[in-house]
Image (spheres, rainbow, N blue to C red):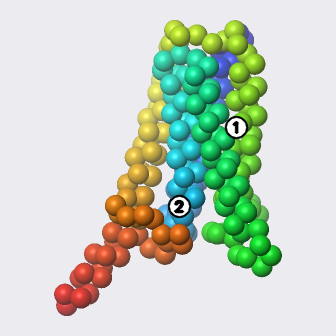
Amino acid sequence: MNQNQLHKTGSIVGLLLISAVLSIAFLDQLNHHDLPCPLCLLQRISFVAMGICLCMNLKIGIKTSHYGLMLLAAGLGFGEALRQVFLHLIPGAPGYGHLFWGLELYIWSLIAFAIAIALIAIGLLFEKGFTDVPRKVGCGAHVLMFFFHTLILLNVISTFIECGLLVCKDNPTGYYLLQSRTLNNTTQE
């Protein structure tokens, strides 16, 4: 396997993993009514930014600029997750959300961003694989990119319903747009 094919395979696997992370977070939100806080939303945005860079690798070609943007997004996400861990580090302070395999989702995000930073750095070492020429990707990669973009759209819609055009609440308990509609209906009766 040449270095370019290694980058392409790594981009597909990375996009698959990021789609899995976003899917788990979104399903957790829907199944457990565990609304994301502003720091959680920022972490999702960082995962989305990394995924967009991986899509650019697949569609435009493998470029160091894509890896640089991914590294910035992963570093930002790491900082956001670390901030959230520090907020809940006080003894006796409850975590935010329920546990997933024994840890809160923001701790898993911290681990995922740390691994992503290491993998991006390793990917940058394979410099013979960088090219401006896009390589043809298969149908499976196109389906994966479509699924990833659908996840982005679902998260945007969900965030809009949760926050409206306002600043999101620190500890959201319900969807803002659905609550205001319910409140309006009860006051009119």
Give the amino acid at mark 1: Ala
Taking the spot 44% from the left edge, 35% from the top edge, the residue there is 146
Tell me the residue that label 2 is attached to: 38
On screen, residue 106 versus residue 34, left or right, reads right
Residue 119 % position (x, y): 73, 31
Pick the quarter of the image with the C terminus.
bottom left
- Marking on residue 141: none
Residue 182 % position (x, y): 30, 79
- Indicate the quadrant where residue 7 lies: top right
Q: Using the image, determine if residue 97 lies above or below residue 80.
A: below
Taking the spot 25% from the left edge, 81% from the top edge, the residue there is 184
Residue 87 % position (x, y): 69, 67
Give the amino acid at mark 2: Pro
Taking the spot 71% from the left edge, 69% from the top edge, the residue there is 88
Tell me the residue that label 1 is attached to: 116
Residue at the left extreme?
Answer: 188
